[in-house]
Image (cartoon, helix red, strand yellow):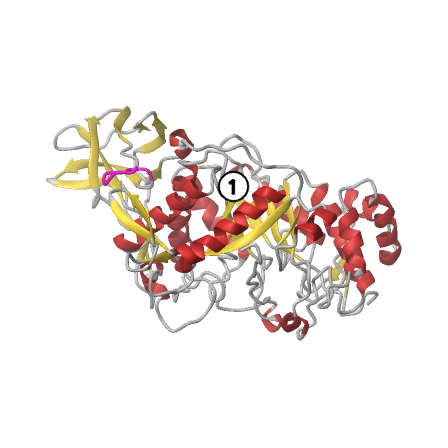
Amino acid sequence: MKKSVNMFKKLVAVVAMAATVSCGVMASHVVTGNAGIVAEAAGRPVSINSCVIQGGTVVANVSCSSVPASDDGKFYLYADEVYQDGTTGKIVATTERGTSATFSFPLGYNSGESNLSKKFLVAVKSGGSMIQVSDEHYITNPEGNAYKTVARNDHGIKGILPTNADAATFKDLGVAQMVYNLYMGDIVCDASVPGAILFNYNGTDYYFNPATLGQYDAFVRWCHVSGFQLTMTILNNKTEAGADLIHPLSRDSHVCPGYAMNTKEDGGTQHLKAIAAFLANRYSGGAYGTIDNWVIGNEVNARTEWYYMSSTNLELNVSEYVKAFRIFYNEIKAVNANAKIYNSIDQEWQRKSNPGCSLAKDFLDRFNYYMAREGNVDWGLSVHPYNAPLFDPYAWKQQAQYVSNDVTSKYITIENLYVLTDYMCQSSFLAPSGKVRDIALSEIGYTSEFGEEYQAASIAYAYTMAATNPYIKSFILFRETDDAHEMESHIAQGLKNLDGSHKMSYDFYKAMGTAQQETYKAKASAVIGADINSLVANRTFLTRNGWFLND
């Protein structure tokens, strides 16, 4: 979601629904002007090769080519909370040293000793002190615990981030998917709230606001009854009841829709675990229906706008986000094995429109580094490949100053989407299965401000780009009806006008994915001046030098 046109950011969409021993030297990077130190090991001798659930037990296998010296000939396995570093957690298992070794210990699911979302490391006793000899590693198959697995509702990529709960419109459009935003601060409360919903998790009582939760219940149920697959984006807003969910480096006066999740303090960390488990339990089949996909944060590289921390240090910011992501991934998958969990970046691949933010590529690279280093799992990528600038009307011919057809491009838009998907095909980015990760275009849209025919042609072109790319799992159009405030900035992305009348783009989007799509692609091709199918199939890359179409 974008926030300001001048910064190429778009306004937040609030959808109102009527349906209510280290043997090497530690190399530390001190974060100047910010709390915290991010440390990386130099050549730790022990590798944790796997850490998996087997029944009610966790089994960790380790190996090393050179067995580190120790006082007592033993390896110790520590379980750290995400905010802990080194040998500060609890010893959960020991075994004899060797070039290979196996640890086994209880999972302890939903108990005060739960190890589900902890990170593990190997240590030896040397000189009377415990010395870390491995990198950290998380459980990588939380689905091994899943007890409410629900069949997925995969049946098409065409989607929308809606303005209203208008099932008739969405059925008419042939929409298969919906995206919605959930604000954590709004769903939590304390025990004094009338009707507060009690959820005991890991031995602690937590409470959820019945009024707010009821609105989400109604929407999830509405999607279920209407046959729409649902993706929920988790945002961390500031409320009194959710104060402990806000990261300590996010507690200044900065105002934005989303703040970094608290992975630095025990209370906030445990609360995050409980929220993730509660949501997975509530929305995995049953009375309300199912949320198939979860996006953890929104455009998390856009630090000042969507995942705020006062720190400007990329390593610190990414590592803190990874900790929150791990919590949600493990807690959700431990309930519903079929749920998919996505991170989220914006389209600012190699350019910062806001210097306080991070480049999407840099954030993605470091996220992937940490996820691979600490136990590869099947995470997905959510991206918003809007035009650059946001109000540019021509999806098929972007301005050369912003968009190129290689990895040096300043922006990832729909025209060079293959740059991103090719990048994700690298071996270092593959899922544990060896496959390319699922990629969701969870927000995209085009303005009609400079001509309805250009919006319609852009949508037909963009949908074709997405539908013919085997790695794209969703194409979520933002939105079905214009927003008056956004229109002040030349952003009229709706398929309908403010009065509800249909724009040209309505019928074009309706036709996509149907037997009628070639007819409408031909109309769009006439606007573009080239055949859409050929442009897409051949990766024909068109650019212009200035604002106007034929510059």
Which residue ends up furthest to the left in the rendered image?
128
Q: Amino acid at mark 1?
A: Gly
Q: The magenta stretch spans which residues?
A: 110-116
Taking the magenta stretch, the answer to whether it contains residue 112 is yes
CA neighbours of label 1 inside 10 A, class few (<14), some (14 to 19), many (20+)? many
Q: Where does the N terminus fall, quadrant-wise?
A: bottom right
Spot occupied by residue 284 in the image (x, y as percentages of width and height) = 47, 39
**In the rendered view, does 122 fall on the left or right side of 338?**
left
Q: Nearer the viewer, residue 180 or 344?
A: 180
The reply to whether residue 117 is visible in this rendering is: yes
Spot occupied by residue 13 in the image (x, y as percentages of width and height) = 57, 63
**Going 33% across and 38% down the picture, which residue do you hit?**
116
Q: Secondary structure at mark 1?
A: loop
Q: Nearer the viewer, residue 124 or 143?
A: 143
The reply to whether residue 85 is visible in this rendering is: no
Spot occupied by residue 283 in the image (x, y as percentages of width and height) = 47, 42
**Going 48% across and 57% down the picture, which residue do you hit?**
300
Q: Which residue is mark 1?
A: 289
**Going 42% across and 64% down the picture, which residue do you hit?**
312
Q: Quadrant of residue 434?
A: top right
Taking the magenta stretch, the answer to whether it contains residue 457 is no
**In the rendered view, does 70 fall on the left or right side of 269?**
left
Residue 186, relative to residue 111: is it above or below?
A: below
Q: Nearer the viewer, residue 335 or 475?
A: 335
Which residue ends up furthest to the bottom in the rendered image?
488
Which residue ends up furthest to the front in the rendered image?
194
Residue 458, relative to residue 86: is it above or below?
A: below
Spot occupied by residue 323 in the image (x, y as percentages of width and height) = 37, 49
**In the rendered view, does 526 fall on the left or right side of 31?**
right
